[in-house]
Amino acid sequence: MKQNNKKQSTSYLPLNWLNKPENVQAFTTLISGGYSTGNYSQFNLASHVGDDLAAVRVNREKLFEDLNLPAEPVWLDQVHSNKVILAGENLVQGTVAEPHVMQADASISRTPGVVCAVLTADCLPVFFCNQSGSEVAVAHAGWRGLHGGIITATVNTMRSSAEALLVSLGPAIGPKAFEVGEEVFNAFVDKNRKNRSAFVENRKHHYLCDIYQLARIELESLGVTRVSGGNYCTYSEAQRFYSYRRQQITGRMASLIWLE
């Protein structure tokens, strides 16, 4: 892979990892440096949010060139499910205007040159790789996906053992900004009493939710203990990230991972 300035670019955020293998590449895009305008300014990579598709196409071309991607990312039709696909296995890749994408919320790759991707704007992107650098994955984990088991489904679909996995939590809405109702609180606590630690009641029947903590609890229950990241807030860091809760008509960041 040729050298470029991707790690220094203001458009890309390298992920924090514990002892990540050198052949694993992973980034989340930021909002700067793209060609979208208005509510989608600047580096929107989603074709489903109402942005001008010509701008999205140019942004995706910039993404491809800036990161020297080995292939077009395997974009997903994300529906807050617990469905996981194996990227690069007989998938039909469409265009920005006609996206022939699979409905799923996580993808796994064991093939060098296949780029897994999810789109987010407050939901949590969860990156996975194994110690040997032979398997990677990324999951889209909003609270619905978390409650539905997208992390568990991803870990269970990977060939690597939980003990061999390294995880990085990408940028999501922070625990001081993510207010939820009692139904969300009850759903998570009923699922696992340990989830209680991820909620702080801030007014009657309303709670501040730490989506990072919910992910860590689930990962720990699966035996995944080497977890990094979880220090950003897409809602409050308006100069860096899109946030659906801050501005419902908005763009999406891409979180990408691949094997060199």
Image (cartoon, helix red, strand yellow):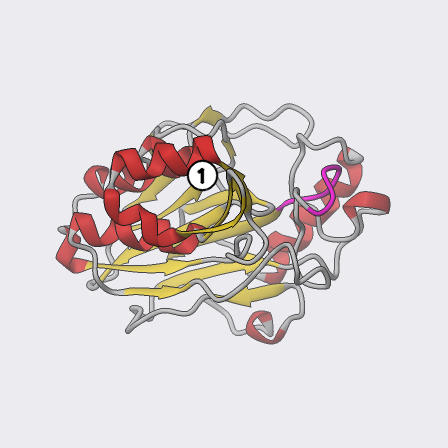
The foreground one among 64 and 136 is: 136
As drawn, 19 above or below 245: below
Q: Amino acid at mark 1?
A: Trp
Q: Residue at x 59, y 26 (%)?
A: 99
Alpha-carbon neighbours of circle 1 within 10 Å: few (<14), some, or many (≥20)?
Answer: many
| Majority secondary structure in the magenta region | loop
Please indicate, yes or no, whether residue 72 appears anywhere in the rendered image: no
Picture coordinates of residue 59 (x, y %)?
71, 49
Picture coordinates of residue 115 (x, y %)?
44, 47
Is 198 colored magenta in this rendering? no
When asked about the image quadrant of residue 248, the answer is top right
As drawn, 27 above or below 47: below
Determine which residue is flagged by label 1. 143
Give the magenta part as a residue range.
246-252
Side of 6 relative to 35 (left or right): left
When asked about the image quadrant of residue 30, the answer is bottom right
The foreground one among 147 and 5 is: 147
Side of 204 relative to 23 (left or right): right
Q: Quadrant of the C terminus?
A: bottom left
Picture coordinates of residue 51 (x, y %)?
77, 36
Q: Residue at x 71, y 40 (%)?
A: 57
- Most extreme residue toward the right is 38
Please indicate, yes or no, whether residue 234 appears anywhere in the rendered image: yes
As drawn, 199 above or below 102: below
Q: Quadrant of the N terminus?
A: bottom left
The foreground one among 202 and 131 is: 202
Side of 175 relative to 249 (left or right): left
